Image: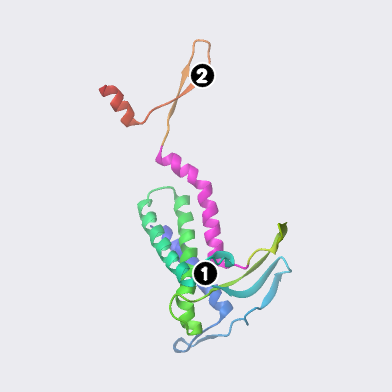
Amino acid sequence: MRVLYFTLVIIFSDQITKLLIKGVDIPFLGIHHVGFPYGTSIPIFGDFLRLTYIENPGMAFGIDLGGKLFFSIFSIIASIGIVIYLYKVRKENLLFRISLSMILGGAVGNLIDRVFYGVIFGGKPLFYGSVVDFIDADFFNINFLGYHMSRWPVFNIADASVTCGVILMLFVHRKVVSEQNPSQRLAAVTDDGKIIPQEIPPASAQSNSTQS
């Protein structure tokens, strides 16, 4: 379960950057950071990459297919499920576990916004906060059936972590499946010199064949 340290780093980085953007005031610690006005857009690498402060009530990249409470509860259930699964596969492929830890870190990072930011910053009840987004990247132009997209939806470190975790999982999933279901092969040579690969059946099948 050491990969959870990776998750903690993602959560910490995500929350620190969000508080730097939004601003934070903790009097008893002597912390007072103003942050950026809502809607601020500052070029970093010209128009290719900008810092743009917005907030959204939905999931990653501003997607909003339901209410805030739904996504908060969904994130909690998904996060618990990933932790349980990480424990079950704690001895499996390292890259696969890292991909899960990245997805978990991103999910928890945005979950903190939804659960607590409404109470801390807006006087709203628990589970009704909005997610802070600020990474504004250029994207190739898309024009399809009246839909136009020239920039990627503004996102944050948590969103990027979930996306990268899913991509990494897709790359290593096949390897994990093959490790969990090993298939050994032999080569049979015919009289004319041809090599015919032969698959060794699982041990259980071999024992059944022997008993029969």
Q: Quadrant of residue 46?
A: bottom right
The numbered disc on residue 114 is none
Q: Looking at the figure, which quarter contains the C terminus? A: top left
Instruction: Indicate the amino acid at tag 1.
Output: Ser
Q: Residue furthest left?
A: 211
Quick check: marks 1 and 2 in contact, CB under 8 Å?
Answer: no
On the image, the x and y values in percent for residue 87 come to 36, 55
Residue hosting label 1: 13
Q: Quadrant of residue 159?
A: bottom right
Q: Quadrant of residue 183?
A: top left
Q: Residue furthest front?
A: 145
Q: Which residues are magenta?
A: 154-181
On the image, the x and y values in percent for residue 110 come to 50, 69
On the image, the x and y values in percent for residue 70 come to 46, 68
Residue found 44% across the figure and 89% down from its top: 28
Q: Earlier in the sequence, mark 1 or mark 2?
A: 1
State left or right for residue 66 relative to residue 136: left
On the image, the x and y values in percent for residue 152 come to 65, 63
Report, in whole angstroms, how far the alpha carbon at label 1 lies from the one at label 2: 55 Å
The numbered disc on residue 195 is 2
